[in-house]
Image (tube, rainbow, N blue to C red):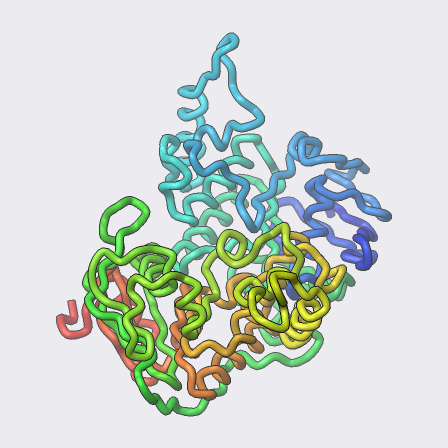
């Protein structure tokens, strides 16, 4: 059996935590191998070892049958190993081409030969069906496109083994289908792929074999064709997992949020949201469905105060908050689980305990006469971490950036829900979470609704919107296409409306 990569009995430790405890993973030539595990199970660490970002304490790595020492990512690149990280490593104000050649710049004499690189990128783009514009700036392209740029970076460096870390966490359903196509093309061209994920549907769709790890230990490797989603979930979490959302019918009360004729500019200084009106009442979850970039960001940022409204009105419990400062909005009862947990959700170099009191550090018991009370902050953070199963090597004293993506997400959700906001705006709340955590977060969102609060849910996971929402508002190109009752609609109808087909016109 010819293996391109063999990772044998790998052990990797960090202070206070064994991230990988004697794990073995083998990758066959031309296969897609899924690495499955809960948040913080050690998946990214294991791949970080293969990519040379970490050195293991024990174990050996073989590439094409030969034992190798991968001391840094450049060595990995030379061995033909490339990696697309969960949080992309791109320079926003560089072009696609500039990002791709960074670190391996082609020269004509002593001058940078950008044209030759752009030409080669165009050829690679065609060959693999990536449709990347070499001259576009990163800040102007969608997240899905940015990911393709990362894939292109690997292909440009002639990688044979491609590692994808949670590649679909940031993609729309249509982009996910595209990515699956791209992966199959890559395999046809003789590449081998490892995909880190906890989305069982995707594993069933593309992977040949799947290795499961739980809390740093290898649980086993199975042939995907012979495994069911339920059995994979059980291997991953260690118990049976329910995929259904259990909720009683909503009993809507007073109007909590009223958005009237709201228009908001996008980053490109044109209207990203146009004359948008919506009401969310106490005791209901209203979902926003739409392909990414159709006005959801503008809507959420206008309500939370991160972006100014060009026209229209936003009311919270009957009070006009259209031009009110952010702190006042938080104090009036708005909680916000942001779309980008690293840019908007956490201060990455602060400890968890500081992050947990960001909105309330100026109130007792956390501060007195301008001095912070560390022990009260720690106690508060510990409670949130316990309730939401946030795993961190050094507890509340851990820096936010040392947590896995899923644990960062759980920390933010815990912080926002602990304040029991009248209106909780949850944007992609389960992005990057495993099935066990998703089940728990869904339960908490419904509990929040049942306690008489309003929830505005923005998610690109259509089945999440359908399962959780009581009513669904569909947006396309900044316009409200229509509002439907979740119990009376299905994926097809909402999908058509997301494409801009309004229900009344039926066309």
Residue 65, relative to residue 208: is it above or below? above
Q: Which residue is at the front of the view, 160 or 233?
A: 233
Q: Which residue is at the front of the view, 271 or 366?
A: 366
Residue furthest left in the image: 505
Q: Is residue 477 visible?
A: no
Q: Is residue 178 visible?
A: yes
Q: Horizontally, is 339 left or right of 413 in the view? A: left
Give percent across and percent down for residue 446: 47, 83
Q: Which image quadrant for residue 258?
A: bottom left
At horizontal 30% and vertical 56% (from top left) the residue drawn is 308
User: Is the C terminus in the top left, top right, bottom left or bottom right quadrant?
Assistant: bottom left
Q: Which residue is at the front of the view, 183 or 29?
A: 183
At horizontal 67% and vertical 36% (from top left) the residue drawn is 73
At horizontal 67% and vertical 31% (from top left) the residue drawn is 74
Residue 257, relative to residue 144: is it above or below? below
Q: Horizontally, is 200 left or right of 307 in the view? A: right
Give percent across and percent down for residue 264: 26, 56
Q: Which image quadrant for residue 367?
A: bottom right
Q: Which residue is at the front of the view, 249 or 318?
A: 318
Residue furthest right in the image: 58
Give percent across and percent down for residue 95: 41, 32
Residue furthest top in the image: 109
Residue 1, relative to residue 223: is it above or below? above
Q: Horizontally, is 175 left or right of 311 in the view? A: right
Give percent across and percent down for residue 36: 64, 62
Number of marks in the rendered image: 0
At horizontal 73% and vertical 64% (from top left) the residue drawn is 395
């Amino acid at each position: 059996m010819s293996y391109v990569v063999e990772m044998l009995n790998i052990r990797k430790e960090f202070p206070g935590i064994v991230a990988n405890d004697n794990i073995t993973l083998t990758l066959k030539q031309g296969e897609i191998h899924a690495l499955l595990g809960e948040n913080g199970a050690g998946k990214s660490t294991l791949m970080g070892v293969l990519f040379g970002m970490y050195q293991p304490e024990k174990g050996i790595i073989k590439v094409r049958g030969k034992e190798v020492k991968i001391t840094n990512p450049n060595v990995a690149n030379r061995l033909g190993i490339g990696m697309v990280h969960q949080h992309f490593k791109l320079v926003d104000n560089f072009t696609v081409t500039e990002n791709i050649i960074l670190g391996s710049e082609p020269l004509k004499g002593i001058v940078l030969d950008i044209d030759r690189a752009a030409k080669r990128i165009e050829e690679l783009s065609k060959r693999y069906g990536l449709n990347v514009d070499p001259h576009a700036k990163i800040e102007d392209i969608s997240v899905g496109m940015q990911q393709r740029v990362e894939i292109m970076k690997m292909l440009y460096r002639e990688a044979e083994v491609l590692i994808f870390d949670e590649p679909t966490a940031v993609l729309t359903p249509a982009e996910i289908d595209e990515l699956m196509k791209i992966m199959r093309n890559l395999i046809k061209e003789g590449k081998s792929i490892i995909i880190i994920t906890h989305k069982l549907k995707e594993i069933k769709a593309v992977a040949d074999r799947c290795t499961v790890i739980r809390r740093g230990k290898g649980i086993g490797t199975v042939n995907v064709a012979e495994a069911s989603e339920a059995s994979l979930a059980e291997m991953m979490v260690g118990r049976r997992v329910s995929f259904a959302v259990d909720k009683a019918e909503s009993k809507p009360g007073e109007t909590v949020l009223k958005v009237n004729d709201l228009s908001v500019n996008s980053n490109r200084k044109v209207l990203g949201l146009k004359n948008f009106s919506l009401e969310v009442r106490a005791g209901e979850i209203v979902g926003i469905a739409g392909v990414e970039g159709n006005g959801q960001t503008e809507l959420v940022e206008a309500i939370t105060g991160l972006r100014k409204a060009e026209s229209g009105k936003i009311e919270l419990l009957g009070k006009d908050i259209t031009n009110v400062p952010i702190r006042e909005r938080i104090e009036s009862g708005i909680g916000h689980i942001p779309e980008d947990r690293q840019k908007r959700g956490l201060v990455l170099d602060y400890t968890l305990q500081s992050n947990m009191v960001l909105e309330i550090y100026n109130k007792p018991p956390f501060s007195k006469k301008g001095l912070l009370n560390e022990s009260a902050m720690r106690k508060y953070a510990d409670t949130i971490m316990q309730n939401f199963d946030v795993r961190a090597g050094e507890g509340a004293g851990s820096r936010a950036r040392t947590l896995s993506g899923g644990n960062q997400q759980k920390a933010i959700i815990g912080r926002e829900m602990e304040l029991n906001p009248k209106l909780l705006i949850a944007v992609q709340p389960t992005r990057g979470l495993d099935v066990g955590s998703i089940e728990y977060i869904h339960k908490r969102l419904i509990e929040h609704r049942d306690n008489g609060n309003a929830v505005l849910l923005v998610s690109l996971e259509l089945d999440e919107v359908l399962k959780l929402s009581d009513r669904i508002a569909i947006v396309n190109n900044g316009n409200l296409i229509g509002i439907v009752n979740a119990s009376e609609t299905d994926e097809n109808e909402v999908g058509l409306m997301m494409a801009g087909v309004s229900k009344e016109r039926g066309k």
